[in-house]
C-alpha cells in the first residue's frame, strides 16, 4: 500500500497517486518485520530498503510504473492495494466536484464504505504516509486557497512523502476535473463488473 491523495472541492477535484509497487517474497515473519519498518517511516531510501530486505532475507521487487489514479466518465478514481494471506484487498476513492465515495474490494466484491458531499482532503496509504500528507496539506492550505493551490499542495505533499519513505515513488500522476458527475454511477458500474 502506498499513497493516493485527493482534494475534493465544490468547484473541482484533484487527485494524485504515486507509482510504486513492492512485492515481498520470503518467510512471513521476515516479510512482516520488513513491512513494519518500511510502513513506519524508518526506511527512507531505496538503498536502505534493499539493505534491510537483504538483512531480513526477504526478496523484494520494486517497480515505479503502477498508475493508481485515473479519470472515468468525468469521475476521478484512485486505488491502493495490499495482499494479506494471498487475498488482494483494495481501497478505492471515487471523486468529482463536491462529492466522493469510498469502496473496498476483496477478491472482486465491491463494498461501499462511505460517501460524502462538500470539500474534503482524503489520503489513502499506510499510517506514516497518511500522516505526512495530512500534515503537509494542513500546513499549506488556507481559507483563501483554491483549486489551483490544491494542485500545487498535492504535488508538494507527494514530493514531501517520497523524501521521507521508500514506500512511495518520486514519480506520481496527478489528475483533476471540474465536473460534478455522479460518482455513484461509476461505483455501480464497478460493482456490477
Image: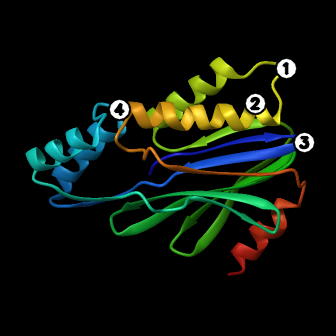
The structure residue drawn at horizontal position 44% and vertical position 51%, both measured from the top left corner, is 1
Q: Residue 14 bears which disc, if any? A: none
Q: Nearer the viewer, mark 4 or mark 2?
A: 2
The answer for how far apart the CA atoms under marks 1 and 4 are is 32 Å
Q: Is residue 141 above or below residue 79?
A: above
The answer for how far apart the CA atoms under marks 2 and 1 are is 9 Å
The answer for how far apart the CA atoms under marks 1 and 3 are is 14 Å
* Residue situated in front as seen by the camera: 100 or 161: 161
Q: Which residue is mark 3?
A: 11
Q: Earlier in the sequence, mark 2 or mark 1?
A: 1
Q: Earlier in the sequence, mark 1 or mark 4?
A: 4
* Residue situated in front as seen by the camera: 121 or 176: 176
Is 184 displayed left or right of 156 in the figure?
right
The answer for how far apart the CA atoms under marks 4 and 2 are is 27 Å
Relative image position of residue 11 (x, y in whole percent) = 90, 42
Q: Secondary structure at mark 2?
A: helix
Is 180 displayed left or right of 124 in the figure?
right
Relative image position of residue 143 (x, y in whole percent) = 83, 19
Is 97 displayed left or right of 35 in the figure?
right
The structure residue drawn at horizontal position 50% and vertical position 73%, both measured from the top left corner, is 107
Crowd rating for badge 4 (residues with CA inside 10 Å; few <14, some 14–19, many 20+): some
Q: Which residue is mark 1?
A: 144
The answer for how far apart the CA atoms under marks 2 and 3 are is 13 Å
Q: Residue 41 bears which disc, if any? A: 4
Query: Quadrant of the image for the C terminus?
Result: bottom right
Q: Looking at the image, do the residues carrying marks 2 and 1 touch, with CB atoms under 8 Å apart? A: no
Q: Looking at the image, do the residues carrying marks 1 and 4 touch, with CB atoms under 8 Å apart? A: no
Q: Which residue is mark 2?
A: 149
Q: Secondary structure at mark 3?
A: loop
Q: Earlier in the sequence, mark 4 or mark 2?
A: 4
Amino acid at each position: 500500500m502506498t499513497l493516493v491523495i485527493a482534494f475534493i472541492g465544490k468547484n473541482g477535484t484533484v487527485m494524485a497517486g504515486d507509482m510504486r509497487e513492492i512485492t515481498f517474497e520470503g518467510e512471513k515473519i521476515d516479510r512482516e518485520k520488513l513491512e513494519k519498518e518500511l510502513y513506519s517511516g524508518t526506511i527512507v531510501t531505496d538503498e536502505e530498503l534493499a539493505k534491510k530486505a537483504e538483512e531480513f532475507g526477504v526478496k523484494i521487487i520494486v517497480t515505479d510504473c503502477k498508475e493508481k489514479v485515473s479519470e472515468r466518465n468525468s469521475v476521478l478514481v484512485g486505488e491502493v492495494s495490499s495482499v494479506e494471506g494471498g487475498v488482494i484487498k483494495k481501497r478505492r476513492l471515487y471523486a468529482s466536484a463536491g462529492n466522493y465515495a469510498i469502496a473496498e474490494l476483496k477478491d472482486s466484491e465491491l463494498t461501499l464504505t462511505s460517501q460524502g458531499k462538500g470539500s474534503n482532503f482524503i489520503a489513502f496509504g499506510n499510517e506514516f504516509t497518511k500522516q505526512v500528507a495530512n500534515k503537509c496539506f494542513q500546513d499549506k492550505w488556507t481559507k483563501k486557497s483554491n483549486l489551483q493551490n490544491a494542485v500545487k499542495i498535492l504535488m508538494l505533499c507527494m514530493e514531501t512523502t517520497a523524501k521521507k519513505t521508500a514506500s512511495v515513488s518520486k514519480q506520481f500522476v496527478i489528475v483533476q476535473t471540474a465536473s460534478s458527475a455522479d460518482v455513484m454511477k461509476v461505483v455501480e458500474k464497478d460493482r456490477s463488473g
